[in-house]
Amino acid sequence: MNLVDRIIRQLCSIFMLAFIVISSSAARAQTAPAPTLVVILDISGSTPVLEPNFSRQAWDDISVRILHLPIGSRVKVFSVGDDKVQPLDLLMYVQRTATVKGDSAGVLARKVVGALQKTVDAMKQGKLVQHQSDLTTAFLDASKWCPGQSAACDIVFLTDGIQSSDDVRWTPHDAKAPLVAIPGMNLRNTTSITMLGVGLGASSKVRVQMEAHWRHFLSEAGASTVVLRRL
């Protein structure tokens, strides 16, 4: 075998190896779990989404998140109030084209914001406002959409942070008391948890206390990244 033949054979081997590596990487990318975005809407009487300035900023935040999701990602949206009636419950996927299951990121962002605004409009008409806000168990529900397996999972909760349910009453006046942990709730697989509206309308002192208790509650459940903002 002459020198030219050996060089050609070596080049073929290199190209074949490169093709195998690229094919394997593409296959892993195709089978990798897609990210999940969970959006929770507090529909109690004290929810901050009834404030137009807050809702505008919240819709923008959620739209940007959806627009950055890759193809195959899923978006779960649900409301939280009495925990017995759930008027808002959606599951959609980011897709290249429209199907019954989802649409492109741009269209999906508009659909999600539209559904949230429709719910808020109904609340303003007195149709959907609920008297309780079972916030802690909402995180339990959301955690089930974050099973792990190396997929990113972000939770965005639009709420003032006031917990009011059959079992727990936790308001700004009770902010010195800790939130009651939920046995077995696991938030370790979440990439980030963002609560928008916590302490809105409360004094600075009370808001700081509320944020500290929510941060502790979520961290104890395994959340690694917690963001708490009024707006």
Image (cartoon, rainbow, N blue to C red):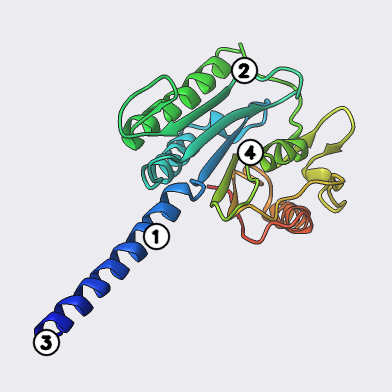
Q: Which residue is mark 3?
A: 2
Q: Which comes before the other along the chain, label 3 or label 1?
A: 3
Give the Cα separation between the discs numbered 1 and 2: 42 Å
Of the residues shown, which amino acid type is indicated by label 2?
Pro
The amino acid type, in three-letter code, at marker 4 is Thr
Instruction: Please say if the residues under marks 4 and 1 sit with CB atoms less than 8 Å apart.
Output: no
Disc 4 marks which residue? 159
**Cα distance, mark 2 to mark 3?**
77 Å
Q: What distance separates the C-alpha of mark 4 from that of mark 2?
A: 16 Å
State the CA–CA distance, disc 4 to disc 1.
Answer: 41 Å
For the point 71% across and 41% down, which residue is it? Answer: 139
Please state the total of marks drawn on the protein image.
4
SS at badge 1: helix
| 62 is higher (above) or lower (below) than 166 | below
Q: What residue type is disc 3 on? A: Asn
Question: Closer to us: mark 3 or mark 1?
Answer: 3
Secondary structure beneath disc 3?
A: loop
Q: Relative to 47, does residue 25 appear above or below in the rendering? A: below
Camera-near label (2 vs 3) is: 3
The residue that disc 1 covers is 25
Question: What whole-number distance in Å separates the C-alpha atoms at marks 3 and 1?
Answer: 35 Å
Label 3 vs 4, first from the N-terminus? 3
- State the image quarter where residue 48 is shown: top right
Q: Is residue 66 above or below residue 224?
A: above
Report helix, strand or loop for mark 4: loop
Mark 2 or 3 closer to N-term? 3
Q: Quadrant of residue 138?
A: top right
Could you tell whether 58 is left or right of 180 in the image? left
Residue type at mark 1? Answer: Ser
